[in-house]
Image (tube, helix red, strand yellow):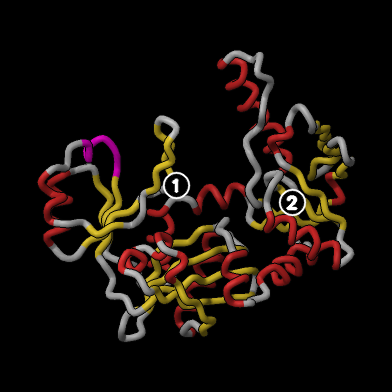
Amino acid sequence: MSVLILAEDIDATADLMVRALMDREVVVHRVNTAWFPAQLSVTAELRGERWAGRINTPARVIDLEGITAAWYRSPRAYRFPDDMNPAERAHANLEAKYGLGGVLSSLPVLWVNHPARLADAAYKPVQLVTAARCGLDVPETAITNDPDVVHAFVKGGKTVTKTFGTNTIMEEGVRKISFTRLVQESDLDDLRGLDQTTHLFQRWVPKAFEVRMVVIGDHITAASIHTRSATAYIDWRTDYDSLDYSLIEPPPDVVDGVRRLMTSMGLVYGSLDFVVHPDGAWTFLEINAGGQYGWLEDATGAPLTDQLADLLAGGQP
C-alpha cells in the first residue's frame, strides 16, 4: 500500500501531508511531474486490466501496482531541455501528457481528485448548472460578450463581475490580480473590448457573511467568514487581515445539495464558497476542486490534514 502525492517541490501543505501519512505508517511517494524527463522516467506494460511497471526518480523506484491512492495536489508542467525548438517541445509535451499522464490517470486507485474530474470542475458554467440541478441556490448569472446584454443585465439590479479562470495575469513582468467587483453605471459608458471574449456577470447576493466549506470524503467542514473592511465585503480575498472565522453547521438541505454536487461531479475533495443572506438562506458561488485548505485549518483548528490523510490512507478505488 502506498500513496502517490503529485505536488510541486516547495509546498508546505504537501509537507504536512507527507508527515501525517508517515505517522500512519503509510508509504508515501512525492513526485513533481516537472521532473520529467530529466529526473523522472516511466516504464509501463499493459497486464490484463491495468498498467504495471514503475516510475523511477533519483530517490526511489515507485511500483505502479503498489499505489492505492493518489493526491493530485499541484504538480508543475513537464520540463524539457532548453535545446529543443518550439515544435519539438510542443510535440514532446503532448506525448508526455497522453503517455505518462495517461498511465497515471488510468490507475485504479482512490484519486483526490482525478485529473479528468479536476478539468471538468474548472468550468464555472458547469459548476453553476450542476449546483442548481442538485438543489442548491445559485445567483442569477449571465455569460456574454454582447455589450447590449450587459447593459440590460446591469440595469436589472446590482451586479458583480468576476473571472472564469485564474484571477492572476502576468503582463510585461508585472503581476496583476483581478478580484470580484461591483459593476458601476459609469462602467457601461465604455465597454470596448468586451466583445473579444466571454465575461461572467452575476446578480449581487445580499450578504450577512460568507462561508468557505471544505469537503473531504464524508467530512464537511464549514467556516463563516466575517469581514471588517469595505473591499473585503465585496471579495474577502482582498484583505485577509480584516477577516474573522468561526466553525458553523450548514443547514441540512445545503449539506444534501453539496453531497449531490460532489457525487455528480465525481469529486471526493472540494472547497466551496457560499453567501449567507441576512435571512439565513445560503447561495452557492463556486467550487474549487483543488482549493487550498491549510489557511482555514490554521484559522479554525479544524483537523483537515488528518481527515485527508485518513482518506488517502484508506486507499479505496
Q: Of helix, strand and loop, which one carries label 2? A: strand
Q: Which amino acid does label 2 sit on?
A: Ile
Q: Residue at x 22, y 61 (%)?
A: 159
Q: Quadrant of residue 208?
A: bottom left
From the viewer's perspective, tell me whether residue 207 is left or right of residue 120.
Answer: left
Q: Give the range drawn in magenta.
A: 193-198
Q: In this picture, is 58 found above or below 282? A: above
Q: Quadrant of residue 298?
A: bottom right
The x and y percentages for residue 242 are: 42, 70
Distance from disc 1 to disc 2, alpha carbons, whole Å, reads 23 Å
Can the viewer see residue 114? yes
Q: What residue type is labelled 1?
A: Thr
Q: Residue at x 56, y 63 (%)?
A: 270
The x and y percentages for residue 202 are: 27, 60
Q: Which of 160 and 105 is in front in this view?
A: 160
From the viewer's perspective, tell me whether residue 71 is left or right of residue 194.
Answer: right
Can the viewer see residue 105? no
- Residue 166 disc label: 1
Q: Of helix, strand and loop, which one carries label 1? A: loop
Q: In this picture, is 79 found above or below 243? A: above
From the viewer's perspective, tell me whether residue 198 is left or right of residue 266.
Answer: left
Instruction: Name the residue that disc number 2 marks.
Output: 5
The x and y percentages for residue 174 are: 42, 37
The quadrant of the image that shows the C terminus is bottom right
Residue placed furthest toward the front: 241
Sequence-earlier tag: 1 or 2: 2
Q: Residue at x 79, y 33 (%)?
A: 40
The quadrant of the image that shows the N terminus is bottom right
**Category of crowding for the residue at label 1, using alpha-carbon neighbours closer than 10 angstroms: few (below 14), some (14–19), many (at least 20):** few
- Residue 14 disc label: none
Is residue 306 magenta-colored?
no
The x and y percentages for residue 305 are: 70, 68
